[in-house]
């Protein structure tokens, strides 16, 4: 395996190796039991964990624990992954784009246009009868139209900051603890989003969860000398081209092991090009955790075929946090 082997005296190698292996087996076994404690329940109306292949998950957890935090990177989506899908009262939570519906510089015509565009293009994005390649032209068209409409309103940076500060975006429970732990142990975090990078960075900073080990890759706004919006960065990042291979340089150290977190079928590809998901762990591994937020009965089978662990109706970040805590505990 690519992980460095512990250096010990020759006469104690066998005993040391046995101790390490026993500790690892207990760590993985305990963690898997914690993760699986609700996985056999099939009540999809409650918070439930679904794991299609427990042996694969166990193997990947073993690789992550063996290699430790210095071989690990986090790649995560933002909307409905780091942020909640619904508030406690059941109301649908906003996304990066939808908060613009409350931006005072956005005209009523533009607000109406953005809503109409979502009604037209979102069903295409989630249509199970279309391939990703068939969806891509529609996604490019949708993002392009939305960006053009926003630019025409002449939004200013100060207004954007006020809008984000007052918005109703809400992080999942324990995301703050998760990020603090990653910062403490210098584990790089790539927040990969088809949303708005400026909104994400501002929100994370306002929430006091943005750290030096983080990098946001998304659609960023371009402002002139008067802080007026003039355009967006290119190329457009949409749901189906969010891959590490598309990033020339993400500014983070390259790690062979990745914990991937997403909520869409396109998110499973975010680590493509960053490492190799090798079943043996020799070249690297990717443990994929998917948040299934709606249309559970229709989408569960698909999500289980794409993600190693599927979390249904879970407003927390408890499972990713447990995994990181277990890896760090094994390192001690």
Image (cartoon, rainbow, N blue to C red):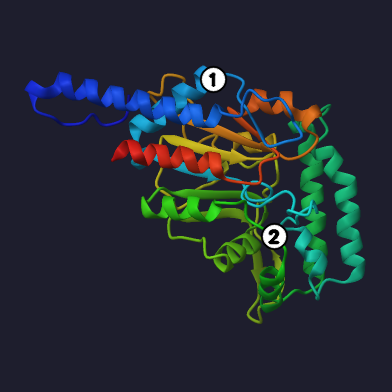
The residue at the point 65 percent across, 67 percent down is 222
Does 56 sit above or below residue 27? above
Q: CA distance from mark 1 to mark 2?
A: 34 Å
Name the element at disc 1. Answer: helix
- Residue 278 appears in the picture as rendered: no
Q: Quadrant of the N terminus?
A: top left
The x and y percentages for residue 204 are 57, 62
Are the residues tagged 1 and 2 within 8 Å (C-beta)? no
The x and y percentages for residue 146 are 80, 57
The residue at the point 57 percent across, 18 percent down is 53
> Residue 281, located in which quarter of the rendered image?
top left
Q: Nearer the viewer, residue 11 or 239?
A: 11
Give the class, few, some or many, for how many residues have Cα within 10 Å of label 1's Cα (few <14, many ≥20): some
The x and y percentages for residue 235 are 66, 51
Q: Nearer the viewer, residue 121 or 145?
A: 121
Q: Which disc number belongs to residue 54?
A: 1
Name the element at disc 2. Answer: loop
The residue at the point 69 percent across, 48 percent down is 80
- Residue 46 appears in the picture as rendered: yes
* Residue at numbered disc 2: 169
Q: Earlier in the sequence, mark 1 or mark 2?
A: 1
Q: Nearer the viewer, residue 221 or 289?
A: 289
| Left-right relation of 183 to 225 | left
The x and y percentages for residue 69 are 36, 41
């Amino acid at each position: 395996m690519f992980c460095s082997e512990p250096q010990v005296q020759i006469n104690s190698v066998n005993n040391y190796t046995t101790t390490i292996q026993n500790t690892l087996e207990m760590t993985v076994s305990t963690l898997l039991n914690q993760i699986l404690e609700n996985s056999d329940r099939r009540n999809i109306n409650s918070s439930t964990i679904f794991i299609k292949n427990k042996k694969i998950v166990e193997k990947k957890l073993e690789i992550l624990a063996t290699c430790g935090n210095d071989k690990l990177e986090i790649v995560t989506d933002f909307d409905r992954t780091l942020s909640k899908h619904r508030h406690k009262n059941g109301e649908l939570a906003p996304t990066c784009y939808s908060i613009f519906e409350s931006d005072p510089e956005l005209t009523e015509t533009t607000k109406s246009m953005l809503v109409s565009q979502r009604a037209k293009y979102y069903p295409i994005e989630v249509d199970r009868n279309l391939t990703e390649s068939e969806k891509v032209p529609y996604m490019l068209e949708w993002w392009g139209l939305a960006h053009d409409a926003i630019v025409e309103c002449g939004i200013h940076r100060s207004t954007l900051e006020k809008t984000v500060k007052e918005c109703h975006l809400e992080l999942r429970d324990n995301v703050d603890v998760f990020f603090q732990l990653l910062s403490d142990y210098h584990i790089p975090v790539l927040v990969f989003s088809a949303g708005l990078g400026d909104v994400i960075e501002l929100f994370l900073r306002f929430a006091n969860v943005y750290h030096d080990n983080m990098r946001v890759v998304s659609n960023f706004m371009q402002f002139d000398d008067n802080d007026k919006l003039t355009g967006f960065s290119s190329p457009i990042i949409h749901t189906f081209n969010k891959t590490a291979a598309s990033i020339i340089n993400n500014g983070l150290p390259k790690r062979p092991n990745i914990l991937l977190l997403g909520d869409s079928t396109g998110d499973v590809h975010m680590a493509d090009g960053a490492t190799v998901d090798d079943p043996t762990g020799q070249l690297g591994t990717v443990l994929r955790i998917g948040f299934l937020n709606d249309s559970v009965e229709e989408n569960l089978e698909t999500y289980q075929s794409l993600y190693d662990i599927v979390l249904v109706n879970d407003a927390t970040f408890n499972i990713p946090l447990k995994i990181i805590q277990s890896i760090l505990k094994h390192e001690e």
